[in-house]
Amino acid sequence: MPGVYIMKNKSGEIIYVGKAKALKNRVTQYFGAGNQHTEKVKKMVSNVNDFEYIICDSEFEALVLEASLIKQNQPKYNILLKDDKGYHYIKITDDKWKKIEISNTVDNKGEYIGPYYSSYVVRDTVEYVNKIFKLPDCKRSFDKRTKPCLNYHIGKCFAPCKGNISLKEYSDTVNDAVEFIKNGDGAKMLPELEKNMQKASDNLDFEYAAKLRDRISAIKKLNEKQKVVMCSYKNQDVFSSAFLGEFSCVSVLNFRKGLLVDKNHYFVDGIVDKDTLYGEFIEQYYVDKTDIPPRILIDGDFTGKELMEAWLSERLKKSVNIVIPKIGEQKELIQMCLKNAADNLSERSKSGGREMSVLNELAKILGLDVVPRYIESYDISHTAGEENVAGMIVFKDGAPYRKSYRRFKIKSFNGADDYRSMSEVMDRRLTEYEKQTDEVFSILPDLILLDGAVGQVNAVLPIIKKHNLSIPIFGMVKDTKHKTRAIASNGGDISIKSNRSAFTLITKIQDEVHRFAISYHRNLRSKKMLNSELLQIEGIGEKKAKDLILAFKTVEGIKKATLNELMTVKGISEVNAKRIREFFDLK
């Protein structure tokens, strides 16, 4: 029977919504023994605590319900195309020397053309209008003569900064540019421009005639460029996708009135084939859109295409066709779109390509089934058991992910016991995972690295078992010079020095977690020392000491403060201020 299924975590939060032609079969696919899932699905299933379903009368009804539930709940593991685009405007400033700019907001200064939904349209229009009319896009003031920039020397700007154009001629040019934008068709301006060029030439004003000639030439070139991206179908969207393992990029080209009006690309993680990708992506792409075209091109078939056509047709109130072109202009559009997707995926992977290569090597060295893209590392820091703390850092795709760093104060005992400390920290961290109330702790790492040898690993393994989890845990061993030497497991040390890239990454992680933990410890110890010095002053308790530190940052700052400055701190009376001054003046 068809229907919609809803997955929830321990806190009752909806983490995934899906539809199925046969609910029983789909549930078996997720939870049946021996199934091979992507890492994204494995993580999702490990978080499922409750599974609900809603039976529907048809697949179409299931699709409509699924789209509605995803839109309402924004589940964590569904493809969510969160479009943060607002409205965009073309702004004509109200300066003496007006400029044409891009703006995302409207105020009372200047003239605005718009709104436009597409930033691509606005950016492209402003870029070409400034190019055609040779208007400046800099922030210079043109009332003073200055040396022109490169744009003047390559013929892209009239250089009003150099005094090459009068204010009147400049203003007329801006007005022409605004008319060009409003008309939306530069070809309509050509007869008038050619007439004015001829007139200027007859009047022997060859300089102005040359400017008009260049403007005419630029408009004609723009029109030729537009023809290249025109298509015979006035309104259609084009989808193509490129894959790199479980990471993919979908490029979307939007044609309206035969012209390319917008283009975007989206990155998707955890899907490895076009069938699954388009089945989810196209639904989410159009779930909030009212501008649905009657024709959609895609570069690969997917299960449920006919159902998707029916859903889109219902929303548009007219027939929508999803087409896979084989030849001609439409095939060329698919190829152009595919190149965009591949280029964007390549660009994204370049920044992380080296890191991913290192992580693959690390996975091989440690015998991991999964490439450790999300690594947590822990270190303990204290001074003879005082101010006993731990630091947790995260490396995501081989790079520090600082917004997920966390600090811990050891609470269960006093004194120095690194094994016991690490055990407490791991227990608290995994308890937070079970609560699912903290975004950082709600993610399970692919790998945990502890600053220490096999003793640290053995102290933590029982905690992992207690929480019924399976997370690879290793220690990071240092040599006598306090440099990274090897990786420790409960089966013995693993040498990594022979693999330079993996060794460098582990060293980087170990140095970073040590820095993070010890800086927290030193900060607490410093505050304690500062407060203890202030507490020696008669009449200054913990509250006043804290307020003084907050006001002057350091004891040195308090030492330099005048009587009146000390008295500005809440709770510090004249008597308190005098005692503070006497205390430090006598030292």
Image (spheres, rainbow, N blue to C red):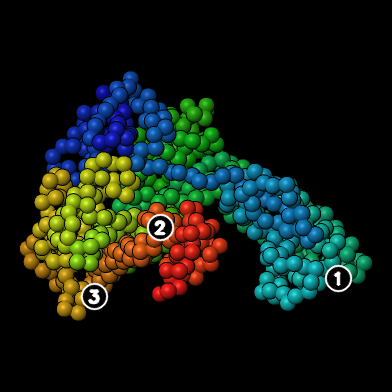
Q: Along the line of sight, which residue is nearer the eye, 470 or 530?
A: 530
Marks 3/1 in contact by CB < 8 Å: the verdict is: no
Question: Please, what secondary structure does the residue beneath circle 2 have?
Answer: loop
Instruction: Compute the Cα span from label 1 to label 2.
Output: 88 Å
Residue 561 screen position, x and y as percent: 51, 67
Answer whether residue 140 is visible to the viewer in this image. Answer: yes
Identify the residue at horizontal 23%, vertical 67% (top origin).
383
Image side of residue 425 versus residue 18, left or right: left
Tag nearer the camera, 3 or 2: 2
**N-terminal-most mark, 3 or 1:** 1
Instruction: Compute the Cα span from label 3 to label 2.
Output: 59 Å
Q: Which residue in the protein does label 1 denote?
A: 206
Q: Amino acid at mark 1?
A: Phe
The outermost residue toward the left is 491
Question: Please, what secondary structure does the residue beneath circle 3 have?
Answer: helix
Please determine whether, in this image, residue 136 is positioned above or below residue 114.
below
Residue 11 screen position, x and y as percent: 28, 35
The quadrant holding residue 169 is: bottom right
**Circle 3: is it few (<14), some (14-19), or many (20+) Cα within 10 Å?**
few
Tag nearer the camera, 1 or 2: 2
Q: Amino acid at mark 3?
A: Arg
Say which mark, if any, is on residue 539: 2
**N-terminal-most mark, 1 or 2:** 1
Tag nearer the camera, 3 or 1: 3
Instruction: Compute the Cα span from label 3 to label 1.
Output: 67 Å
Q: Which residue in the protein does label 3 denote?
A: 500
Image side of residue 45 versus residue 111, left or right: left
Question: Please, what secondary structure does the residue beneath circle 1 have?
Answer: helix
Please determine whether, in this image, residue 418 is positioned above or below residue 543.
below
Q: Along the line of sight, which residue is nearer the eye, 518 or 340?
A: 518
Q: Amino acid at mark 2?
A: Gly
